Amino acid sequence: MKKITSILLTLTMLLACVAVFASCKKDNEDDNGLNFGKELLSVGSQLDALNGLVKGDADIAVIDSVMAGYYMNSVDTFKDYQVLPGVVLAEEQYGIAAKKGNAALIAKINEAIIALADTDYKTIATKYGLATETLVKADTANPKADATDASWDKVVTAKKLVIGYTLFAPIAYTDGDGTDAELIGFDIDLAKAVVAYLNEKYNAEVAVEFIVIDWNEKESLLANGSIDLVWNGMTITDERLAEMEVSVPYLANKQVAIVKKADAAKYGANKEEFFKKTNNAIIIAEKGSAGEELVKPVE
């Protein structure tokens, strides 16, 4: 009898271990590596993320508040969509980036923006509805002022400053159609004003060339010299500070969630509720963006 009891006890323990193992295995299989949402779609730009949301590819788009404010209020395509109130996924700051080692170029960019703080910088920000997001003041320090590398001299010699950007209103976008289309936006106008200031101060003849880039390739394009600067609402992170030369923070931003107005109530009224109520949601974000990293952290 004792032998039978012992065998039954052993079998019970084995079955319990199998059940626990199966349960653990299932949990691991269900772990999608995301901070929230059941699936992440990564697309080429933040505008692609918004358009994907409208097409029904996803339930929630994670984008910059600077962009959300423009598109939700100015473009009829997105009239049925909104920023989730109370759900701020991250607060951040924008910076302008050059290749690591090209500190002198960034020093000149810093110098010009600081010099224009009370004039063009402020005027351009007001023009694009970003006056409350500006960060540079006339007394802002230039941390790279002592840089002595040849990066600025090379730009002067080439008479050209190549800036990489993506379409991202009100930061950079086209106004008009066809041959009449004009590239405008806060960063576009500010870059032109900065170069005009530097040309006048240093008796240079630098022209600005804007090139549309794949945002996910910005680091490699800087590294191989295809572009001189990434100037396109780039979020400053510790990783980017380590891998690039980055300007002083020049614009404040937040990461926000965009949803259909009809669905807004089901995702909660704050970030904590949002995380709990998005288990079945498909999230869409720009590849290589701060928004994507919030959904699925870089490994």
Image (cartoon, helix red, strand yellow):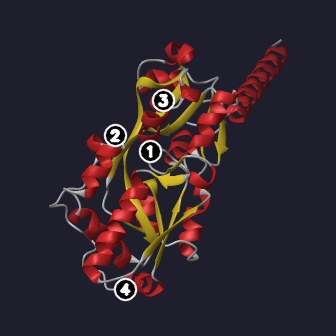
Q: Nearer the viewer, residue 207 or 110?
A: 207
Q: Nearer the viewer, mark 4 or mark 3?
A: 3
Query: What's under tag 4, amino acid-wise?
Result: Asp
SS label for mark 3: helix
4 or 1: tag closer to the N-terminus: 4
In the image, taking residue 63 as reference, residue 28 lies left or right, namely right
Determine if residue 284 is in view.
no
* Residue with the mark numbered 3: 72
- Quadrant in the rendering for residue 213: bottom right
In the image, taking residue 117 as reference, residue 74 lies left or right, namely right
Query: What's under tag 1, amino acid-wise?
Result: Pro
Query: What's under tag 2, amino acid-wise?
Result: Gly
Marks counted in the figure total 4
- Residue at the far left in the pictured view: 139
Determine if residue 243 is in view.
yes
Query: Whole-Å distance between the Cαs marked 3 and 2?
Result: 13 Å
Vertically, is 35 above or below 44? above
Residue drawn where x is 45% and y is 82% of the image: 159
Where residue 95 sits in the image (x, y, percent)?
38, 58
Label 4, residues with CA under 10 Å away: few <14, some 14-19, many ≥20: few
Disc sitting over residue 149 in the figure: 4
Q: Nearer the viewer, mark 4 or mark 2?
A: 2
- Residue at the far front in the pictured view: 180
Vertically, is 124 above or below 284? below
Disc sitting over residue 123 in the figure: none
4 or 2: tag closer to the N-terminus: 2
Q: Are marks 1 and 2 in contact (CB under 8 Å)?
A: yes
Query: What's under tag 3, amino acid-wise?
Result: Met
Picture quarter with the N terminus? top right
* Residue with the mark numbered 2: 129
